[in-house]
Amino acid sequence: MKNSQAAPVRLAIVKSGRAICYLVACLTLLTDVATKNWAVTSLADGEPRKVLGALLDFHYVRNPGAAFSFATGSTWIFTLVAAVVSITVIVIARKIVSRPWALALGLLLGGALGNLGDRVFRSPGHLRGLVVDWIELPHWPIFNIADAAIVIAAGFITILSIRGVGYRDQSRLSHQSERSE
């Protein structure tokens, strides 16, 4: 590929990574908000609904803490962390080339925004809102779609980091373009 063609191709690749990140974030956020609204209107507070025998219950609770109901008196800290994570991902997303990183960061952004929305807009409000959790598995804390997205993103990010894949890594794309010459 000639150098004069390299800049538009790189720009298209970066836009593609950013688009994937934002698309995944939007789908994650919309799914999280829709399922939380369903849980609030359809599940009785504190009463589990059996779905798959002993494997899965839907159990609506409001969580003032973080994962595993950790630090329940520090809701404002989680609001701040979610806001910082969201802003950081948005800034990084402008430079994403790697599709796996775009997927991972999209899940992280969607999950962070989902729980941040609860902290900002749900009662008691004033950045201290309680997060709606509703999925219960055996021997596991009750969680929501945003929590699941954050955990999956953390797993992807760990694997990508261990494998040495950078969010700007386009090595696979470079090899493909060399083959097409």
Image: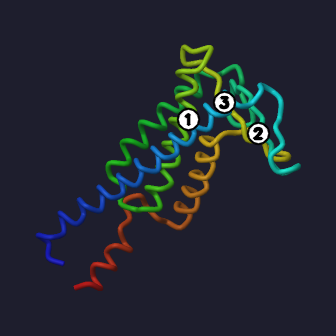
Query: How many other residues sit within 10 Å of disc 3, few (<14), some (14-19) or many (≥20)?
Result: many
Q: What amino acid is at disc 1?
A: Val
Q: Residue furthest left?
A: 4
Report whether 40 appears left or right of 180.
right
Q: Nearer the viewer, residue 88 or 40?
A: 40
Q: CA distance from mark 3 to mark 2?
A: 12 Å
Q: Residue furthest right?
A: 54
Q: Residue furthest front?
A: 42
Q: Position of residue 154 (x, y in %)?
A: 59, 51
Name which residue lies at 37% across and 72% down: 171
Report whether 132 appears left or right of 136.
left
Q: Nearer the viewer, residue 137 or 159?
A: 137
Query: How many other residues sit within 10 Å of disc 1, few (<14), some (14-19) or many (≥20)?
Result: many
Report whether 92 appears left or right of 2.
right
Residue position for label 2: 58
Residue position for label 3: 132
Looking at the rendered structure, the secondary structure element under dot 3 is strand
Q: Position of residue 71 (x, y in %)?
A: 71, 26
Q: Nearer the viewer, mark 3 or mark 2?
A: 2
Query: How many other residues sit within 10 Å of disc 2, few (<14), some (14-19) or many (≥20)?
Result: many
Q: What amino acid is at disc 2?
A: Phe
Residue position for label 1: 33
Q: CA distance from mark 2 to mark 1?
A: 16 Å
Name which residue lies at 52% across and 62% down: 160
Name which residue lies at 37% across and 48% down: 93
Looking at the rendered structure, the secondary structure element under dot 1 is helix
Whether 94 is drawn above or below 40: the answer is: below
